[in-house]
Image (cartoon, rainbow, N blue to C red):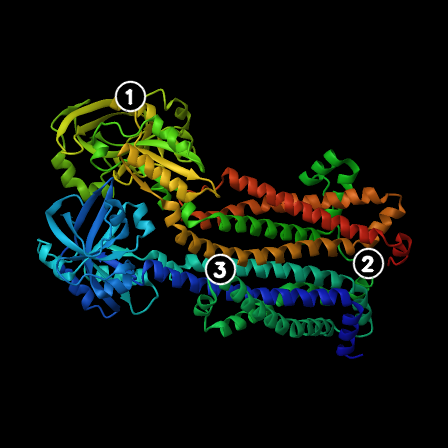
Amino acid sequence: MELIDVVKSYIIKNKKNSLLIIVSIIISTALFLVMNIISEDARNIMINQAKQNLGTKHAQYGLRNEKEIKYFEKNSSIDKLGKSMLLGFNEMGHGQTLQIVNDDRVVQELDNSYDLKEGNFPIKENEIAIDSWYIEQKGIENPIGKSIELKYTGYDSTGKHVLYQGEKEFKIVGILKCNPILKAQATCIGFISEECAKKNITVENKYNQVFFKFKKEKDITNQVDKIAQENNLSKADFLINKDLLLAISDSMSLKIPYIIINVILSLATILLIYNIFYILLSSRRKDFGILRAIGFTPSEISKTMIFEVFIYAIISIPIGLILGGIIANLSREYIIGVIYDMNYANLIKSQSYMSLYIISTLLSVLTIIIAVYKPLRECSKIDPMVCMKKSDEKIKINQKSLVSKFMTKFFKDYGNIASKNIQRNKKRTNLAIASMIIIFFLMSTLYTKSTSNFLSDNGLRHWIPGDYLLHNIDYKSAGDNKMSYDKVTLQAIKNIDGVTKVNPSRAKILDIDIDIEKIDKKSSYWTQYQNDIEAQADSIEFREGKKVYREQFEVMGIENDKILDDRIIDGKSNLKDIDNKPYIYIDKYSSETLKIKVGDSIKANLDVSDSKTGDYKETISKDLIVAGIIDYIPLTSQGAGCTFGAVMSVNQMNKFTGISTYERFDIWTGKFANQKNIESELKQIIENSDKGILIPYKSESAGLEKSDNQKAMIMTLVVGVIVLLSLFNCCNTIVTSINSRSREFALFRGIGIPKDEVKKIVVLESCIYIVVGFIISIIPTLIVRYIIIKSFETIQLINLKFIIAVILILLVISAIIIITTLKTLKNVQGEDFIEQIKTLE
């Protein structure tokens, strides 16, 4: 008998399992290719959008003097170098700042900061192209051609010391599109000509920054470090375009998710094929014994199985590659093409897909080899006489295990039988549990990825957490002590149709007395500002006779203390008294740098000045108790930002200042609310009160939200496909396991155990697989969740939404597995159990 005949007979005899193996390899190969192609497309989308949104610059450097420019000009690794001049900052009011700058053509190309909405860029010395946000705030109608007077202030590199001040008349020749990210940070741009910048910057060093791009887009960080080291420059003065580097895979942090996905996909496929192949070979044990008895060597038996696997692979892999290619093209056309547009989908199409076909083929081959290696090795080594017996497996039942005790105690005889069945076939049990682990892990990862959103979760939400921000805060008003908004204004906002939530708050700049001796002398704060701190130290003796100086804190007054629940590091028990006692919560950076701890008493001072003239009026002082430490203040004021931050209640801040008021309202709206009407009514409130400014962040960030959601959808698609494969694997494990135990169930029936009781035993086994798989998956799930969310400051590792999502995932998977179990068992029990018993070996 030739090997080909043996293999042919096996394939024909086991059509169902053979077909299942072929289909599994086709699906896995197709998914390998689809995932890799979609990942490549997603990567290209990220690169393309990153370059559009963030520019193509690799890094920028803040110049200390213009002589440093030559270090970059002579560097052979730099491909493009641009220079920038900052004339100064113009205070627009309400904490809004206009940066008046000139960038050369190279910087404009690399930085991509300016998008001209109307008109032209300036050429003459008195011309300016200005942000549309400035035009709107100043109420300038038909701005092109009109003249404006701009006061400006130039600062040193630290931003603390004024170098010069000036005022100039400009003619508006262009309108720049408003950048919502800059707007959220209370900043906009005014672009001037090179002639204007050089003429009006009165210090010797005109240029303040250089922007550059390397010839090679690899190891960017190391290349920057090399420039700093060779020219004795401070690394702190370099700003690397990290988001762009992440998108072009300069960082492994982008590659890791795709590597993990490949590994998980491969593992899921290995388990699937191993499970089918193991059951297939187990059913042939007697055949192997007969072949060995008639003279077949272990090597020849291995060859028959290897040849069979080769046939499966040679049929499946090409079909899988063709199917994967078709699915990938359809995905690009009907998913990416719909999410963006077809021209964009074609634009991001890679030229390196051939390498992905090769990689996918190799992954499939490697997966098959790993899946079948152990079963093949075992079947070729078993003794012929043992092969012709039912089993050589030594079954060890541990009645004292925790699982056995638990199941027997709570489920009596059913639990005892189910426990023994689970232990009797450890391979089946391990495969089932491994399948459960993968499916729970992937579904939790899918949830995390799909709910981590740029707009909802990144640092910009410290400036504007809601859909709208209405405030009356700037650096001057944060130092006065006047009424801004009252409760009538708060109620008027709440009454607007479509407004779902309003968080009122206060913002003041308080000077806190700091003991110089307690400052962390190793901190960057002390290193950078030591001379200023010592020079400004008070001559007044403080408490224990130690010298102090006063440091500015941005202090937010809040009414809704629930926003601190997830922020508190220490002192949560004091939160209940935040309204009634003179409590203040300081941020972690302040605590560590200034060595302030919970329970300390600190002296807070409000130097009241006239918001119009700036003249000093009085100082209000009060001792406050540090009630706790928070990781960071939950709100960042647009116009009163400081290095150090703290939070107290609105009630205590009102008692401190002697005035009951609000300076800020964060406003949320309904999903289907009329945004135009809401914005109009909020503007009317500002007009009636003649105070403040409205930032309509929701409407203006729609483009950013679309871009971020598009990338999230594609990543969700990739992970979702793998979830489906794992779910298929999980259900297949259950199905093949139950089908292989048909004789066992027949014996149960033969000794008098009815169908319903057999059903209870098998369902209980499936429940054990689910519970154990879920418990084991918790740790890897949390690790990967941490990796995904670590760049999103406002997402907690474990929060209520995540817990609810996990519970829902558990319920859905449990329902699918139990339904699969019951349906398969019903089919098996539908056969004549007497005939099944007769077939026992």
Q: Are marks 2 and 1 in contact (CB under 8 Å)?
A: no
Amino acid type at mark 2:
Lys
* Placement of 394 over or under 367, stated as above or below: above
**Label 1 element class:** helix
* Identity of the residue drawn at 74% across and 44% down: 763
Compared across the picture, whether 468 is left or right of 547 comes to: right
Examine the image and state in which quarter residue 469 appears: top left
Q: Which residue is mark 3?
A: 339
Image point 88% across, 59% down: which residue?
839
Q: Could you say whether the residue bearing mark 2 is in a helix, strand or loop?
A: loop
Q: Which dot, 2 or 3, sits closer to the camera?
A: 3
Residue wearing tag 1:
655
Disc 3: CA contacts within 10 A as few (<14), some (14-19) or many (>=20): some
What residue lies at 57% left-to-right and 56% top-to-bottom?
Answer: 720
Residue pointed to by mark 2: 390
Taking the image as drawn, is residue 466 in sight? no
Q: Which mark is residue 714?
A: none
On the image, the x and y values in percent for residue 273 come to: 67, 62
